Amino acid sequence: MQQELKILLLASALFMLSGGLLGPIYAIFVEDIGGDILTAGTSYAIFAIIAGTLIFFVSRWEDHVKHLEKLVVVGYALSCVGFLGYILIRNPMDLFIVQAIFGIGQAVGAPAFDGLYSKHLDKGKFASEWGVWESMALLITGAAAAVGSFVANFFGFKFLFVIMLALSVLGLAVSSLLLFRKRKKR
């Protein structure tokens, strides 16, 4: 497995762990800020519609970009801003803004990640190397769900959000290694 894939996997794992900590208890958090089931649904819709719409256009532009590594890092940086935003949320409107930031981050980072990951697959190992990512995503998300509910239950959402932010910043730092590897190869 190429070094770039290892970096992408580690950075992705840290972001999945970060986001997965909130996943199954998201609706409880929404209630805590004065929201209801409609707020939870609307906030996720904002993320998905923004991400889906922008990915359609951004991915076409990214096909012509030479340095996808930079866009992966920018996407992760925007996600870090989103995780910071969770700490600052006071009401449903704040949540909607944070979800929009996550949508933009996903739109910038996901196509670049997929393109870069695909570019560094070893010949003859396409299925197994994508399988590593798929397997990791499910295992980490499952473990994060258990850990996140435990942390929120005993320490509260603010503490959970600080952990999420710290993990995302660590993931951003790991992803920035792609930029340094790119410079070394020139």
Image (cartoon, rainbow, N blue to C red):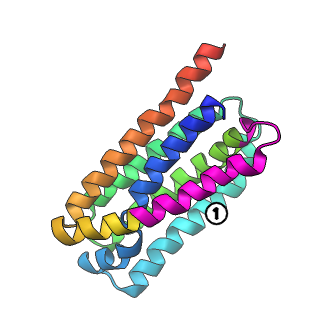
Asked if residue 160 shows in the view, the reply is yes
**Above-or-below relation of 52 to 59:** below
Q: Tell me the residue at 21%/61% (across/down).
A: 158
Q: Is residue 165 left or right of residue 106?
A: left
Q: Secondary structure at mark 1?
A: helix
Q: Picture coordinates of residue 36 (x, y %)?
A: 34, 85
Amino acid type of the residue tagged 1 in the rendering: Gly
Q: Is residue 183 left or right of residue 162?
A: right
Q: Tell me the residue at 33%/54% (across/down).
A: 164
Q: Tell me the residue at 59%/47% (across/down).
A: 108
**Above-or-below relation of 78 to 53:** above
Most foreground residue, 114 or 60: 114
Q: Which residue is mark 1?
A: 52
Q: Is residue 92 left or right of residue 109?
A: left
Q: Picture coordinates of residue 125 (x, y %)?
A: 77, 43
Confirm whether the magenta stretch covers residue 73. Answer: no
